[in-house]
Each structure stands twice: as structure tokens, then as C-alpha cells.
Amino acid sequence: MTKTIRKVVLILIVAVSLLTGCGRTNTDHGTSTSQVTAEGTLANVAATETPLYGAFEAGWQASLGSGGSFPPPPLILPTPLGKGAAALSTPNWNCANVTASGDLSDPDDDGIPANGRFAGTCTITKTGLGTLSWNLNFTVQDTNNNDPLSGLKTNGSISWELKDKWEVKWTASEHSVQRSSLSYKLVYKGGWEYTDYIDPNQSGAMSYDLSGNWTPDNQNINFAHVWSDGGTIQMHGKVSSSGDCTANADFGFEVHFNKNGCADRGQMQYSGNDCSGRVCDASVSWSSCNGPYSSSGGCR
């Protein structure tokens, strides 16, 4: 993978980690007077993508464990923030300049507004890192205000910026999570754009169009924890990147996570063109957290 792809993908994982570590955790439902906050709402949105990035990361690790015949998925993101970024505590950010509008009521107390919009900037300054900004222009809607497990719909953009160094912008053209029987129907469409202020040649972007299902092992757990308490994600769709790495891929995968967040079994298929222009058609599978891994195909 090129430097740009490494940076953008890990930022994705870190961004999700930052958001899912903040906000309100609901264990009591039905408080009709509840209102949500920007931090809590975005934590719920980011949580719904946790299995997606976990699946891509697991597929990449499995490819390494099987000898690397499976090409690097374009959505595996290392980051300029480094691993220490996950320790940043989002509730300590200054979000006084974020404006919340629309219907912010939360009748089912699931941390998702009836139909709210959040716009503005949060900031935090960390010694040795600098000033980070979190720029919001996002709409979030509860799919059923009377059901705390029903899901959400959202669209808009969120940008993470390290002043004078880089910016990563996430634009969700469609992001819907809707409960259907024992699983959630997922539709994720959008893109990520990385801008390197120091070296513009490192800038790049990626887009995605994915759909599938998430089936939690525990059907009755609080919505905020449905995504990290174990379950199976099935997804298929397209991912493409541009910039110093131009590539495209069709993905299909099914990955199960245990309660500890380990991908203890899974399989993933990939076909497309990698950053070097090679034609790729490969698959990888595994049956425990630490392998053994089985792979076939590759790039030519």
C-alpha cells in the first residue's frame, strides 16, 4: 500500500475509535424527555461502522498470515495520528461552537435524535501533537422513535483536521442501518478524502458503495453496544481510490466477531486492479482468531 492509503485507512479506524469511546451509554429506555448531544449521536453513528472496518482489518491480517497472496484492501487505514490517538477522549473536546437543530428529542432513549442536524467545530489541543479540529455538518434520524433497536439514517460530512498538517474528510451520501427481524440491513455509500498540507503529492481519496447485514449474537443488547458485543457482518460492494494510488475493487465477505472483538472466523473475496495496475482476483478464509489462514489467487 502507498503512504496515502496507509494514512487514510488508519485514520478511519482511529476516527471510529475516538467517536465510539465518547457519548452517552444508554441502559434505560423510554425516557421521553431525553435529548441527545452531538458527541453522543456521532458516537452511535461511528459505532455502526465498527464491524465494517474490523472486517477489512481482519481480512488484511489474514492475508499476511497466509503469505500475502491476498492484496491489501483499500480500506485498511494506518494514520498520521498513530496508535496514541485512540487515547484522545472526545468528551473533553470543546464543542461549544456546534449548533444542534431540528428535532433533538429521543423518546426511546437510544442516543439517536428523532431528526437532528449538527453543524460546527469541536477542538482539542494535545501536547506534542497540536490542535485537532472535528468539523460537523451532519443529519441523523431515528428510523423508529418508539424502538430503541430500530436503527438510524444519516448523511452529511465530518472532517478531522490537524492544524497546518493534514485533513481527512468523510462524506456519507447514504448511511442507513435498519433493523429487520434478527439482523440490521446496512447501506453505506460515500467517500474519504485525505489532504496533506505539507506534501500535496501525498493527498488522495477513496469512495465506497457497500451493502449487507449485521446480525448481532445478542438480540436484546443496547443499540450503542450491538456493534461491539459479537455478531456476523456480511457485505458486498465496490471500493475505489485515487491520488498517488489509483485502484478499484469488488469485495464480498462474511466475518464473525466474538464478544472480545476478535474476528474468530471469516472469508473474504477481492477482485479488481491494485495500485500498480495489476489485475487481482483472490480470496482468504480463517477459522480462529489466530489462523490458520487459507488463501488462493493473487495479482498478475
Image (spheres, rainbow, N blue to C red):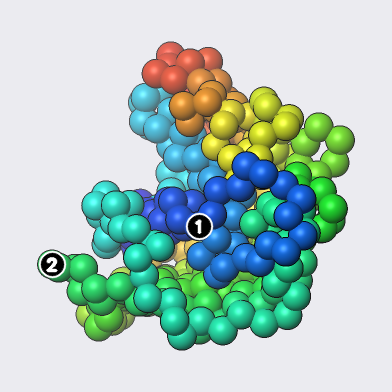
Within 10 angstroms of label 2, few (less than 14), some, or many (20 or more) residues?
few
Instruction: Please give the label number shown on residue 118.
Output: none
* Residue situated furthest left in the rendering: 128
Q: Can residue 154 be spotted in the picture?
A: no
Residue at 41% x, 56% y is 18
Q: Is residue 45 left or right of residue 109?
A: left
Which of the pair 137/234 is nearer the observer? Answer: 137
> Quick one: SS at disc 2?
loop
- The amino acid marked with disc number 2 is Gly
Where is residue 63 drawn, in percent x and y?
A: 42, 31
Which of the pair 246/93 is nearer the observer? Answer: 93
- Quote the CA–CA distance across marks 1 and 2: 26 Å
> Quick one: SS at disc 1?
loop
- The amino acid marked with disc number 1 is Gly
For residue 175, what is the image quadrant? Answer: bottom right
Where is residue 105 drawn, in percent x and y?
A: 73, 68
User: Please, is residue 101 above or below residue 129 in the view?
Assistant: below
Where is residue 2 drawn, in percent x and y?
A: 33, 57
Within 10 angstroms of label 1, few (less than 14), some, or many (20 or more) residues?
many
Which residue is tagged 1?
23
Residue at 35% x, 65% y is 92
Q: Is residue 230 left or right of residue 76?
A: right
Single out the mark in the foreground, 1 or 2: 1
Circles 1 and 2 in contact, beta carbons < 8 Å: no
For residue 221, what is the image quadrant? Answer: top right
Residue at 56% x, 84% y is 99
User: Please, is residue 122 above or below residue 89 in the view?
Assistant: below
Q: Earlier in the sequence, mark 1 or mark 2?
A: 1
Where is residue 143 drawn, in percent x and y?
A: 81, 58
User: Please, is residue 92 above or below residue 300 in the view?
Assistant: below
